[in-house]
Amino acid sequence: MSTREQIPVRIDEEVRRLLEDRMILPDEVRGVINHAETTGRKLINSGTGRFLACHRPKAVTYWVEYEGAGDDFQVLTAYSHRMVTKSSGSTSEWVKSGSDSDWLCGQCQVPLEIQTVRLQYMQSIFPIKLPACSGCGFILIEEELAIGKMAEAEQALEDK
């Protein structure tokens, strides 16, 4: 039995249908949670205590919002995108515009700040302002952005 199979996750029927619609397998969800829980690389919502984590095992980045710990993880939503997030290198070079996020970096324990980062897909690079950790550079791609404008841009670039 693989490590992913051993991670106990609960996925209610509504979330299971959402995953199917978004072509995300339960094993991919387990992989994200496993990665987050073993590395500590996740975000924590300061208001709800929920976690948000991502993992890019190949050409797709999977995001999972979940709650729980130890032997009990409840999946709340999951989404994906194919764009790659890029920083300009040192986070000290990022253009920062303060913190307005409820998300804290799980590793650095600091609130995310809106910062200018880059998204890349195929040969195109897009500068964009997104919440990110000033300490380690973890960049948050929110669900609405991933399933909306990012998905549209990916499709438009593929159609060229």
Image: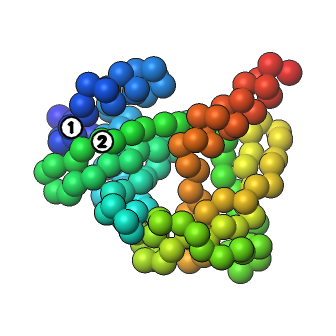
Residue lying farthest to the left in this orientation: 71
Q: Position of residue 24 (x, y in %)?
A: 43, 28
Disc assigned to residue 10: 1
Q: Secondary structure at mark 1?
A: strand
Q: Is residue 74 left or right of residue 63?
A: left
The residue located at (20%, 57%) in the rendering is: 69
**Residue under pointer 2:** 75
The residue located at (24%, 31%) in the rendering is: 12
Query: What amino acid is at disc 1?
Result: Arg
Nearest the eye: 3 or 103: 103
Tag 2 and tag 1, C-beta contact below 8 Å: yes
Residue 39 seen in the figure = no
Q: Position of residue 139 (x, y in %)?
A: 59, 60
Q: Quadrant of the image for the C terminus?
A: top right
Q: Is residue 96 above or below residue 83?
A: below
Closer to the N terminus: mark 2 or mark 1?
1
